[in-house]
């Protein structure tokens, strides 16, 4: 079934909303909704405290045609160190490509001459409205900017030929990084098919 063949849906009406809880970074917004069939429900969603967020970026940096770069950094949610792709918030007024270039310089000390947007993802869209733009970046060159990390990030080159080994690791578990890996694989497959035709 294609998107065009799906029936149109009417968005529910927001009858009321208020902040149920708030921290330094997030607030929980309580919503009272009425659906098009008359059913009423209460929902909650997580919002950033910066207002409408421009989203975030995650980059798959290619060191060469057969090697991508991962970082290993502390993750407070799981209280451990995780391998994943470099990522960060988009600052007000930045495009995803500009944010990707800045974050690369801050996190891995590299700039890039080529970016390819692969897909925009949502994380738990039932509760959270932010998007993450996945970009493939190539033609890297050394250039460093100061970042906001509390400690240096481990930079881990990884062969595209060892993806199964990466997927088997317990410290490579972030869903967005796994999705970015598969999106990059699909991009390379389609790119290789286009060059062999």
Image: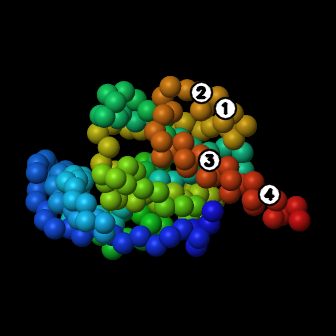
Place of residue 183 in the rendered image (x, y in percent of width and height, measured from the top left) = 61, 52
Kindly report the distance in space between the C-alpha atoms of the residues bearing marks 3 and 1: 11 Å
Q: Are marks 2 and 1 in contact (CB under 8 Å)?
A: yes
46 up-or-down from 2: above or below: above
In the picture provided, is 150 more to the left or to the right than 197?
left
Place of residue 51 in the rendered image (x, y in percent of width and height, measured from the top left) = 21, 65
Name the residue tied to disc 1.
164
Chain-order first, disc 1 or disc 4: 1
Foreground pick, 1 / 140? 1
Name the residue tied to disc 3.
182
Tag 3, which secondary structure?
A: helix
- Which numbered disc covers residue 192? 4
Chain-order first, disc 2 or disc 4: 2
- Say which residue appears at 72% left-offset and 54% top-offset: 188
Tag 4, which secondary structure?
A: helix
Kindly report the distance in space between the C-alpha atoms of the residues bearing marks 3 and 2: 14 Å
């Amino acid at each position: 079934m294609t998107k065009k063949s799906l029936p149109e849906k009417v968005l529910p009406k927001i009858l009321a909303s208020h902040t149920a809880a708030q921290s330094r970074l997030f607030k929980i917004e309580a919503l009272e909704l009425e659906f098009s069939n008359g059913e009423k429900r209460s929902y909650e969603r997580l919002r950033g405290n910066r207002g409408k967020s421009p989203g975030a970026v995650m980059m798959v940096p290619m060191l060469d045609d057969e090697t991508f770069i991962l970082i290993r950094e502390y993750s407070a949610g799981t209280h451990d160190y995780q391998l994943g792709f470099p990522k960060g918030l988009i600052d007000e007024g930045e495009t995803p490509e500009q944010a990707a270039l800045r974050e690369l310089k801050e996190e891995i000390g590299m700039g890039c001459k080529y970016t390819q947007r692969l897909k925009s993802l949502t994380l738990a869209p039932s509760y959270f409205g932010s998007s993450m733009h996945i970009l493939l970046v190539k033609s890297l060159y050394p250039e460093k900017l100061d970042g906001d990390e509390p400690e240096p990030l481990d930079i881990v080159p990884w062969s595209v030929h060892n993806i199964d080994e990466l997927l088997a690791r317990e410290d490579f578990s972030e869903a967005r990084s796994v999705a970015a890996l598969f999106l990059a694989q699909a991009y390379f497959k389609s790119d290789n098919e286009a060059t062999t035709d």
